[in-house]
Amino acid sequence: MPDAPPVLQPAANPARQILDTKLTYDVTTLSATAIIAFAPSTEPGATLEVGDLMIDSVMVDGADVAFTAVTAPGSMLHANDHTIDLAIPESTMPTIVTIGFHYKHHANFEGASAAGFTLVWPYHCGNLFPCHSRPDDGLTFTLDLTGIPAGKTAVFPAKLTTEAPSYQVAWSIDAYTELPLGVTTAGTAVSMWYRPTELTAAQTGGTHLVAVFDWLEKNIGAYRFGPKVGTVSVRWGAGAFGGMEHHPFWHISSAALADHETNAHEAVHGWFGDGIRVACWEDFVLSEGTTTYLAGRALDVVAPSVGASVWSGYATDLNGVSATAKVWPQSCNALDIVDDDLFTRAPYIRGAFFYRGVALKVGAALLDQALAAFYTAHAGRAAHMSDMLDTIKSVTGYDPTVCADMWLKSTTKPAANTPCP
């Protein structure tokens, strides 16, 4: 008799790409299923980040697949994350793997909260579903939730068909009422989802949101994440102020629900941060600096008095930013976004004033054209901040290298609204 074929063993293959992820959750039992389509590969195996998930089963075509859980810190992972390696063969066709698992609640913005919301930025997607968290790695997904408590509504995207960062998978469950705000010229419906007692805050925060979204669609480019968008109020707790770019239904702390800039900022992330991913964590300024500038720019146009107040607030923030804080380190995923202090206010504010300096040099309208050209070239993909400098030079004729050095690299902090040299 011929020898039995060798049993396929789990093999690490972190380079094997994920083509699509279908997620189904029961939020009462904290159980879930992920159906993951892996790309063809000339090497066997596949690697997924799983955080603290409890893996119940891994199957291909109804048959069990061997897997090995390992702790593997490295460039793809935060040091405390975990991975599983799968025993799947090399293939010229996509391989569909079905993973059953249970997940846990997290109290520190590192997964699903018992308060009803999720937040996995920057690299905690493995606490919610098997994933790749690297910022340049995009995914498409479908999402379905069951077990929603009576009297509550779950707000989440059922499907994203254009590639997005892993942290864009999100939901929030609460006693929501939807406040439709209007429809943009391109046909995008904009709403606010607010909790009891928050109607006034939602009306205030949503005052200019349709106009801001309309300006972005007209001046930066077509929105990529569906025909309906909006702000979702989330219970982040005392002292939490801000938002998270979970497009098309971005989350904003209930404390910031009435804030015009926060609503505009999270809307802009549909273009920068989500619509265009950062190639490395060191390119964080490409997401947050560009978004902060465009929030102020859009409000300048659609509500000038609000825009003036926003830029005044940015100037105050600049005063509080350390001159030595990292803005644009010249490496790629060599630094941890949190542990190495990349996640500070500096990339937001110094980044915004870099663009403001370019606008004061070449004109805001011409800079709008450069940002639109950049979005056209890179939408749905990852990019570096250096690519932005190249685009600004190509479109405007002005080389922003010296200005970028001044605002994004130097430990000497320029004054607010300083034009580029």
Image: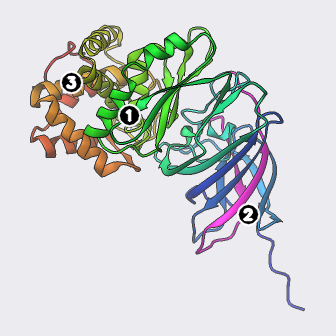
SS at circle 3: helix
Please say whether residue 400 is visible from this viewpoint: no
Residue at 15% from the left image edge and 33% from the top image edge: 365
Looking at the rendered structure, the kind of residue marked 3 is Arg
Between disc 3 and disc 1, whose residue precedes?
1
Looking at the rendered structure, the kind of residue marked 2 is Ala
Residue that mark 1 sits on? 287
Residue 195 percent location from the top left of the image: 62, 17
Q: In the image, is 141 to the left or to the right of 138?
A: right
SS at circle 2: loop
Between disc 2 and disc 1, whose residue precedes?
2
Between disc 3 and disc 2, whose residue precedes?
2
How far apart are the alpha carbons under marks 2 and 1? 36 Å
SS at circle 1: helix
Residue that mark 3 sits on? 356
Q: In the image, is 72 to the left or to the right of 188?
A: right
Give the colour scheme shown. rainbow
Residue 268 percent location from the top left of the image: 38, 32
Which span of residues is magenta-colored? 79-107
Residue 87's tag is 2
How far apart are the alpha carbons under marks 3 and 2? 52 Å
